[in-house]
Structures are given as structure tokens and as C-alpha cells.
Image (cartoon, rainbow, N blue to C red):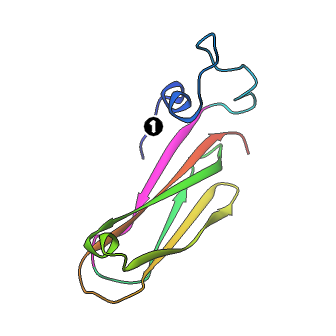
Amino acid sequence: MTAIDPVALERRLLALGTNKQFPATVFSGLSGLELVTAVSALDSSSPKAVLVTCPAGKRAVSGGYRLTGTPVNNGNVEVTEFYPSSATQWTARAIETTAVGTSWMLTAQAACVAGT
């Protein structure tokens, strides 16, 4: 589990206003932002599924995924599902579209905030 500075994340996600500040309303109601990551095995098995679970007292408001490995680079892997599986979890699934027998990995992240 990896925590990230919410201010640093906001700076990457939004353009600053003319006063170099984010509008106060942009993140109202969202506090305690934490990015949680889960990874599959780095192997040639297919399909792969990853379930990311937010810490207690937090809910998932967004998610992301990344595919890595030679089959991915060659276009032989695709994400087939990516969705919030509950208020506190995010699911990602991927498959090899062409069996190649080399290793690849699925990584998923959930953006978790305080609240239920």
C-alpha cells in the first residue's frame, strides 16, 4: 500500500488558476486521499484479476490500471474489465489475446478517500 501527497496529486490532475491556487470547491468533500495499489503475479498465466481494497473507513472514488511485459508491448494483452466492485474496492481483469508464453503483469490502483 502506497500513500501519496494529495497536494502533489492535485497539481498533476488539474491546471492551476491564475492565482496559482486550486479552487476551494474542487476537492470539497474529499479528504484523506490515498492511492492503494495491487499487482498480479509476473508470469504468463491468463486471465489475471486484481482486486484493490481501500483501508478501513475509506471509499474508492476512482481507479487506474497498467499492463507491463513483452506481450503487452506487442499488443497481445488487453484489459477486459475495470470497475468499482463495491464502495471500497476496485477490480481490473486482463487476458492474453494471443497466447505467447512470456511474462506480463496487471497493476491496479484505487483512489480512496475518507468516508463510507
Above or below for 86 versus 22: below
Above or below for 12 versus 60: above
Tell me if mark 1 has few (under 14), some (14-19) or many (20+) residues whose alpha carbon lies within 10 angstroms of its own. Answer: few
In the image, the segment drawn in magenta is: 32-43
Asked if residue 21 can be seen in this view, the reply is: yes
Q: Which residue is drawn at 55% across and 56% down?
A: 53
Quadrant of residue 3 within the rendered picture: top left
Relative image position of residue 104 (x, y in whole percent): 30, 72
Which amino acid type corresponds to the residue marked 1 in the rendered image? Ala
Q: Mark 1 points at which residue?
A: 3
Residue furthest bottom as drawn: 99
Location of the C terminus (image quadrant)? top right
Q: Which residue is drawn at 51% across and 73% down?
A: 93
The secondary structure type at the circle numbered 1 is loop
Quadrant of residue 22 within the rendered picture: top right
Residue furthest front as drawn: 18
Q: Residue at x 46, y 75 (%)?
A: 78
Confirm whether the magenta stretch covers residue 71. Answer: no
Above or below for 88 versus 83: above
Relative image position of residue 11 (x, y in whole percent): 52, 27
Above or below for 7 versus 104: above
Question: 12 or 7: which is nearer to us?
Answer: 12
Q: Which residue is drawn at 36% across and 80% down?
A: 76
Asked if residue 41 can be seen in this view, the reply is: no
Relative image position of residue 54 (x, y in whole percent): 57, 50
Relative image position of residue 14 (x, y in whole percent): 59, 31
